[in-house]
């Protein structure tokens, strides 16, 4: 499997772990990770997409998410779906490893397991027609 690691540590807060049980906890932690209030999320997501768009594995997952949920491929929108309540706990460790590389506490095995979980999740999405 392709390694998610990158040689440069970007601004993504890859050292922060997350754990949420409620939608309110999810929103709070998502905004905390992005270091934003709820009104700034689009700017931050755009910047994150720019940082990850050259990674083919990341884009494959983003394209799969949009194709299965929307019926068409839009990797940028697909990546936004990876921040959804159901996916964020699996996607965040992938980003931790992507931005933190070997310095991240997240193992490559965890990244691969989470990536596979997300692939299965989106393969099973039934989109409303």
Image (tube, rainbow, N blue to C red):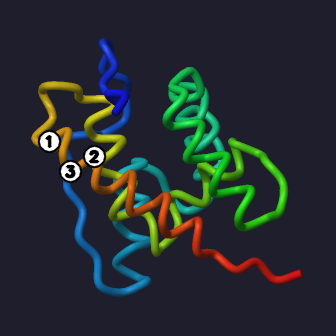
- Residue 18 image point, x, y percent: 24, 62
Q: Residues within 10 Å of mark 3 (few under 14, many from 20)?
A: some
Nearer to the camera, 63 or 100: 63
Q: Are marks 2 and 1 in contact (CB under 8 Å)?
A: yes
Q: Are marks 2 and 3 in contact (CB under 8 Å)?
A: yes
Residue drawn at (69%, 42%) of the image: 76
- Residue 34 image point, x, y percent: 42, 48
Kindly identify which residue carries mark 2: 111
Secondary structure of the residue carrying numbered label 2? helix
Left or right, 99 with reference to 79: left
Q: CA distance from mark 2 to mark 3?
A: 4 Å
Residue drawn at (37%, 23%) of the image: 10
Where, by quadrant of the figure, is residue 8 drawn? top left
Secondary structure of the residue carrying numbered label 3? helix
Q: CA distance from mark 2 to mark 1?
A: 6 Å
Left or right, 105 with reference to 80: left
Kindly identify which residue carries mark 1: 107
Kindly identify which residue carries mark 3: 110
């Amino acid at each position: 499997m392709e390694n998610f690691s990158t040689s440069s540590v970007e601004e993504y807060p890859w050292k922060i772990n997350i754990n949420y049980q409620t939608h309110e906890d999810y929103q709070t932690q998502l905004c905390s990770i992005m270091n934003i209030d709820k009104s700034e999320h689009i700017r931050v997501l755009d910047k994150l997409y720019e940082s990850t768009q050259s990674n083919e594995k990341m884009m494959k997952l983003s394209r799969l998410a949009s194709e299965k949920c929307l019926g068409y491929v839009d990797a940028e929108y697909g990546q936004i779906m990876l921040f959804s309540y159901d996916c964020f706990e699996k996607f965040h460790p992938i980003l931790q490893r992507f931005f933190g590389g070997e310095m991240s506490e997240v193992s490559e095995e965890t990244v691969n397991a989470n990536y596979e979980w997300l692939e299965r999740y989106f393969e099973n999405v039934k989109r409303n027609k």
